[in-house]
Amino acid sequence: MALEILMPALSPTMEEGTLAKWLVAEGDRVQSGDLLAEIETDKATMEFEAVDEGVIGKLLVAEGTANVKVNSAIAILLEEGDAADATVSPAQSAAAAAPLTHEASAVDAPAATAAPAAAVSNDGTRIFASPLARRIAADQGLDLAKITGSGPKGRIVKADVSGAPATASVSAPPPMAAAPAASLPSSASVEALYQGRSYKTVPLDGMRRVIADRLTEAKQTIPHFYLRRDIQLDTLLKLRSEVNAGLEARGVKLSVNDFIIKACAMALQSVPAANAVWAGDRVLQMEASDISVAVAIEGGLFTPVLQDADSKSLSKLAVEMKDLAARARSRK
């Protein structure tokens, strides 16, 4: 029976994406886990892998197509015995298009973090689940072997894990109530203010739009305070030179940022009340110190997160930060 390959949700907030590049062609045979395409989300470019095995019967969406809705069909996968013009049954198509709900999370996942590896049951057989479903299951401590999938051929999708009882030590907070919409001027009214003036209109790409939305949301819904401090780094710079001399043989070089990352992580451990996340009607006090670092790229910035920074050495933090920064700049 022919199967529809659907546009995946590669992040909890993704609603549409750009099919940047096909890595297969019509007539190619694919196995579960083979890479099918590169998908551009609002910020990153991520690889999308096959869940089932078969032959690519038809590519429904051309390379470079933007604004492809999540859960819309992008290709047809044929199984043994299927004709090239086989169609997907309505029931199967409906099952594959299980509705996605976008729940607010206390902390956005790092842009450069990959989806968890495919799950395997106790008897060694693979459990078929979408990348987003695997990520949610890992975050919530769910056993995919105990969840029945509603997707095609029993595939576990986000709708299946969203309602499953969590076994994680910290439960996710309920979705925050949406902040009242600010009364913002329309583009027409703004343009009217500058009527007769010379200007160039620069359209927003996906990244700039998301940055604007997130900053507006954060400013409206999260209490803000600002700290400023001047420090003298002479002693630190001397220490950095000495440590780098010892690390030279390993090809590791510490930056001042690496020391600041470590210092912030240790400060949060020293003041547990500050190592917290605002969750609307409660505060989540974290045990480990996760530090996000802004990485500027053309047109915006990423903030990859160094998890458990308090328990990692300076050299390990330096290696991880270098890798995350490189991936952020290449939008990978």
Image: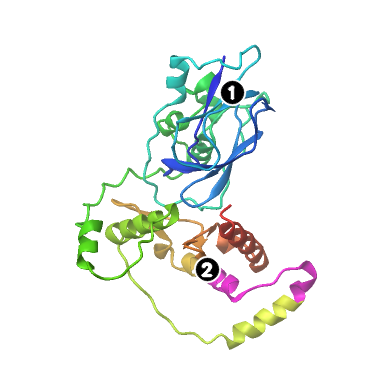
Using the image, determine if residue 111 lies above or below residue 2.
below
Is residue 98 part of the magenta span, yes or no? no
> Which x, y percent locates residue 214?
37, 56
> Which x, y percent locates residue 307?
55, 57
Q: Residue at x 58, y 25 (%)?
A: 58
Classify residue 285 as left or right of residue 252: left
Q: Which residue is mark 1?
A: 77
User: What secondary structure characterizes most of the magenta part?
Assistant: helix
Does any portion of residue 30 appear in the rendered image? no
Q: Between marks 1 and 2, how big is the CA–CA gap?
A: 51 Å
Q: Residue at x 51, y 21 (%)?
A: 152
Is residue 251 part of the magenta span, yes or no? yes
Task: Give the camera-side residue of 251 and 206.
Answer: 206
Going from N to C along the chain, the mark reached first, 1 or 2, is 1
The kind of secondary structure element at disc 1 is: strand
Which portion, as a residue range, is magenta?
246-263
Q: Residue at x 40, y 33 (%)?
A: 100
- Callout 1 amino acid: Leu
- Callout 2 amino acid: Met
Q: Quadrant of the N terminus?
A: top right
Q: Residue furthest top?
A: 81
Task: Give the camera-side residue of 58 and 145.
Answer: 58
Q: Which residue is mark 2?
A: 266
Does any portion of residue 118 appear in the rendered image? yes
